[in-house]
Amino acid sequence: MKRDKIKQLVEKRITEDGMVETGINGVRIFKVTNAIPCAPAVYEPAVIVILSGRKEAILDGDKYIYDNSQYMCCTVSMPVEAGTPEASPEDPLLGIYISLDTKVMTELAIEMESAGGAIKLPKGNSQPQGLSLASWDDSFSDALLRLLQLGEDMMDISILGESRLRELYYAVLKGDAGISARRSFGIGNEIARSIQYLSMNLKKNVTIDELASLVGMSRAVFHRKFKQATRMSPIQFMKAMRLNNAAMRIAAGMNVSEAAMAVGYVSSTQFSREFKRLYGQSPKKWSQSKDLLESIA
């Protein structure tokens, strides 16, 4: 089976816990043998493939648990809680993290729309979720296997890496997560563009009106489409992005005040209050009591 071959290729290249570069731009492999409880994180546009074990992500209270039967596709930056609560030496988590190159994904999505016509939206014309699970299909398995078969030969990677990564992107765009991906990277990607703008301007006091104006929508339409895509209102999303980014900074060793300022909070009191409301503890207590081992995205 192709999936078994992919797993064998990864197992040969990683023996200890952590994230390892493959040499192919944006493609890393990872292994976790310790249970890591879910902690604040920010998912960037990526495909996460699990080969053994199970991974968990929580978005606005909704839990996503995925293993080697489905891959995770995140098409926009999303504030989540992520972890590996079931990993153990006997049942390690083994997987592949593939960043989605915005430029290449956009080129492919627009080419597909030009060739195949407008995207068919899900029933009810709802905005697809920015975080979705997709079943492996033959195209995805073939493309992933061909990508990893480049191994560690730098000449092969240099000459063939981009084309094989492009082939994998194309398989994602054609697969179960294709509608979500094409909405985020192709024509009509207003919500994805607003999220990208927000992510780059966390320190600023970005307003809903500003975001709506940026993508040419009324406030009401923007609010509705944004919530369909992220399951959160724009205000909830902005707050979650700021707090998750701050929590990640605290986990990396930054003090609470610096972390608060880094994501745009002027008042440390307000930051602590909102942090406690979301995570159930003050930032200081959270940093002291939480297992701050970095979670594999």
Image (cartoon, rainbow, N blue to C red):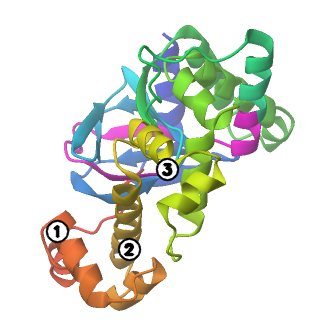
Give the alpha-carbon distance from disc 1 to disc 3, as whole Å: 27 Å
**Label 2 belongs to which residue?**
246
Specify the amino acid type for callout 2.
Ala
**Label 1 belongs to which residue?**
277
Name the residue rendered at 52%, 20% in the picture: 5
* Residue 53 image point, x, y percent: 29, 33
Q: Earlier in the sequence, mark 1 or mark 3?
A: 3
**Label 3 belongs to which residue?**
219
In contact (CB < 8 Å): disc 2 and disc 3: no
Q: Which residues are magenta?
A: 77-106
| Callout in the foreground (2, 3) | 3
Name the residue rendered at 40%, 68% in the picture: 242
The answer, for residue 27, to whether it is visible in the render is: no
Q: Is residue 281 left or right of residue 246?
A: left
Q: Is residue 82 magenta?
A: yes
| Callout in the foreground (1, 2) | 1
Give the alpha-carbon distance from disc 1 to disc 2, as whole Å: 14 Å
* Tag 3 secondary structure: helix
**Crowd around label 2: few <14 · some 14–19 · many ≥20 (10 Å):** many
Specify the amino acid type for callout 3.
Arg
Q: Is residue 142 left or right of residue 294?
A: right
Q: Is residue 113 magenta?
A: no
* Residue 85 image point, x, y percent: 20, 47
**Crowd around label 1: few <14 · some 14–19 · many ≥20 (10 Å):** few
Specify the label residue 213 is tagged with: none
* Tag 1 secondary structure: helix
* Residue 59 image point, x, y percent: 30, 45
In contact (CB < 8 Å): disc 1 and disc 2: no
